[in-house]
Image: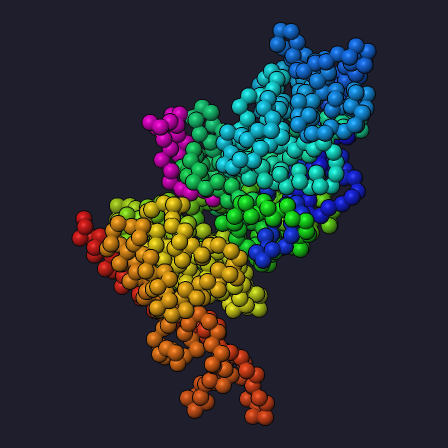
Amino acid sequence: MANIQKATSGSSSDKEPAPYIVNLANPPKKAPRKTNKSGSAALLTMLSPETPNLLNEHRRFSKPWLRVEKCLDEANRLSTAGNIQQSDCTDADGNFSPASAALAALPWTRPATYKQKKPFESERQIYAHMSAFILLVSHYVKQEIPAAQRDTDECRLILPFEKTDINPSDADDDTRVDLILRTRRAGHKVKLQPNPSYAGTFCVAEIKSNSSTKNLNDARIQLFDYSRNIYANQHDRRFVWGLTCYITDATKRREFIRLLVGWSLCRKGQLGFDETIVPCPDIQCQAIHVPSGSDPEVPVLYYWTDVIMVADKLFGRHCRCFLATLNRPKAPVSAENPIVPSVVIKDSWTVCGTSEEDDENSDLEADVEELRIDGTIESSFVWPSPRLAPETLVNSGEVRSELNILDKINKVLGSNTEYNGLYPTLLNGGWVRQPSHTGQVLDCAREILFGLNDEQKAKTPFYFHVRYAMEPIGEPLNTARSASELIVVLYDAMRCHKAISDECSILHRDISDNNILVVRNDSGIHGLLIDFDCAFDRSAESPHRRPERTGTLPFMSIGNLANSAIPRTMLDDWESLLYLVCWYGTFGINENCEDRDCKHRINQWCVGYEEEIADQKRSDLSTTGNFYDSIVSDFGKHDSNIGDSKRLSSLASYLHLELFFNHQFGNVPKTPYHGTRINREYDINSMFDEDDGYDGSDITPVNNSKNTKKPSKPADPFEMRVNEEQTISQNLLDVLERHARRARKELQTAK
C-alpha cells in the first residue's frame, strides 16, 4: 500500500496511520538530552490533504483518478496477457505515453497481479515505478487545467527528477535522497526532470520496501534531515512537504492521487511557499512585504537580492536576514547595477507557550544522531486560543518577542543621541500575514497544521511568523582591521548594552561574535549590538522564574552553561565578552578559525556537554595564574601583529581581574566574592559582623532569633557578585573605556 506517512512524529504507534495525514511539526522520536530542544521553527511542517482548500472540488480530483485507474487496469490486462515489459514512460517518438507510464508503474501499483508475489527486497526497486506513477497522474491533471492557466502560477505539474538516490548539487552534506519532486508550470512537458537540486525541490520522498515501524521512523528522521538543505536554498519557504511511500493498494493509491491533484491545483502558499516574498522578473530581484509600523495589516514593500543569513539549522527560530532597499530598482539588477541596501530585514519564527533555548549553534551531526535514538519528547506545548492575538500573548508573557524588545529600546533610548547607531533602529515590522481564500490570515502553526488532536498539539510548538526592517547595516566583527578597531567596537556595544540594561531593564543574554557588528561611515568606525532574540525584560519577567540556558558556544557564561538557578545579570554578558576577547586573541582578529589549532585549551570551551564546559571554564579562570597559563599564553600564535595580541592580552587580563577578583571586595583569598568555585571556607549566614551594621540580609534571609541556629551554606562567588552587579559592571565598562580611549588615539594617529 502507498502510505503518505506522517513526516515527523513525537511518538511511535503500532496502529496503521491515516493514509493521507502527512505531518506533525515536531521532530521524530528523540531521547531527552542535557540540552533540551523545544522543537523546530516551522521545520518539516506539512499541510494535510484533508484541508478542503487543498483538495479542491471533487470533480477536479475524480477525473484524473478514474483515468489513472483505467489506464492501470488496461496495462495490467496487457501485461497479464502478453507479459509486456516497458522500462520508461515514452513512446517510439520520445513523447510521454500514458500506456507506457502505466506499464512502468505497474509493479508498484499492482504487485499481487504483476508477478510481484512478495514484497520488494530493496527500496531501490521501487524508485522508477513510483516516478512513472507520478508522471501518469500529472499527465491527466494537465488535461484538467484550462489552456489559459497553464502558463501561470495558479496551477502546476508535480514532476520527479530523473535521477534517484541522489545527493543534490547544492547540498552541504553527503546525504542521499531517494526521490525528489519539483513543480513546473502546467504548460511544461510531462517528463522526468534533469539536474536535481534543493533549490528546485518541492517535496522529498523516502521509499521503503515495507511498512515496518523501524522503516517508517527512519524515513521520518531522514525527511527531517533533508528539510534543512531545502530551507537553506529556498529563502521563501515556510514549510516543507515530505513523503514516506511503500507498496500501494487501491484505497491508499486513491488518496495519493488526491494529494497529487491537490498539490497541482491549490494556492502556492499551501505548497509551503511564502506568498509575501514575490519574484520581480522584470527587474531581476525579489520583493518582500514587511508589516508597516503604523498599520501592521498594510505591508511596506522592500526589494532584495542578497541574503546574509539563511535558515540552515534543524532547530531554532528559522531566522533569515535580507539586505534590502525601499526604492524599487529602475533597471534590471545586475553586477553592474546592484541594489544598494539601506536596511536589514529579519524574518523568523517565535515560539508561544514555552521558553525556547537557543540552538542556533547546535551540532548538526549530533542533532541527526539524536533523532535516531528511540525515546519520547518530554516537552509539553500549549497552543493559544484562536481568539488571542500575538500582542495579547506578548503582554501576558506567553510569547517573548524581539520585535517588542526593540520597540521598547527605540522608545526609551530614541531621544538620547549618545547611543544613536549603537542598537538597531526599528523602521517597520510586525506579525506576518499570508493571503488565503478567506483573506489575510496570521501566519502561525494553526494556519499551517490542520487537524491536530490535543496529544499532537502537546508535542508541537506553536510558532508565530514575525518580520521587521532595521538600520544601520553592519559588517561581521571579524572585519575589524586591528585590535584597536576591535576594542572600539566592543566598547560601543557594551556601553550600549549597559544603557539598555539600566534604562530599559532589558538583558541581552547572547553576547557573541555574531551579535556585535562593525559599522563604518563618514564619522569613522563604531560598534552595533544586535540580535535581541534571547533578551528578556527584567521588569516584566517573574523574579521567581528559573533562569534559562541561552547563548552561543563558546561564549556562554559559567552560570549559563551550568544551568544555575542564580539569576542572570549583566555580569553574565560581561563574562561572555571576556570569552569573545579571548577567542580573537587566540585565533586572530580576521583569521579563519576553521583552521584553528585543536591543541589550544580554549577549544575545550565548545566541546562536550554544557556542564562539562562550565567545569572547564571554572578551572581555566580559577586564578590569574591559571587564566594566563591556560588561555592568555596562546594569544598571538595565529596573528603576526604582536601589538594586537598585546592589546588583547591586556584587555582580557583586566576584564578577568575585575570580573572574578575585584579588589573592592577584599584581597585574595580573604573574600567569598572572588574566584569561580564555591568557597566552603565561608558560611554566608555567619560571615558578616553585626557590629559593622551589615548582616548580609540582601544576599540571604537572616533569622534574627538567637535560639535558632542558621543553616550552613557555602558561599558561591557567582551568587555573591549578583548583589554587586552595578558596581562590577561599571568597573568593567571603565576598563573597556580606558582601552578604547587609547585605541581611538592610535586610529587617529594612523590616519
* Horizontal relation, residue 734 to residue 180: left or right: left
Name the quadrant of the N terminus: top right
Q: Which residue lies furthest to the bottom in this view?
A: 707
Specify how the rendered protein is coloured.
rainbow
Whether residue 69 appears in this view of the structure is yes
Q: Which residue is drawn at 68% across and 51% down?
A: 375
Q: Residue furthest top?
A: 93
Q: Main secondary structure of the magenta part?
A: loop
Decide which of 116, 567 is in the foreground and name it: 116
Task: Note whether residue 518 is visible.
Answer: no
The x and y percentages for residue 416 are 35, 58
Residue at the location (41% across, 79% down)?
Answer: 671
Q: Residue 244 lies in what quarter of the image?
A: top right
Observer-nearest of 295 and 152: 152
- Which residue is drawn at the image coordinates 59% and 42% (left, top)? 43
Residue 341 within the magenta-colored segment of the rendering: yes
Total numbered labels placed on residues in the image: 0
Q: In this view, does 487 lie to the left or right of 402?
A: left
User: Which residue is at the front of the view, 708 or 115?
Assistant: 115
Q: Where is residue 739 in the image (x, y as percent from the top left)?
A: 27, 61
Residue 489 % position (x, y) = 32, 54
**Residues in magenta?**
326-346
Query: Which residue is nearer to you in this view: 71 or 67?
Result: 71
In the rendered structure, does residue 344 fall within the stretch colored magenta? yes
Question: Does 555 sit left or right of 43 as displayed?
Answer: left
Relative side of 59 to 225, left or right: right
Write the residue at 58% across / 58% down.
Answer: 34
Tell me residue 425's x, y (percent).
41, 49
Q: Taking 543 as reference, is 212 above or below it?
A: above
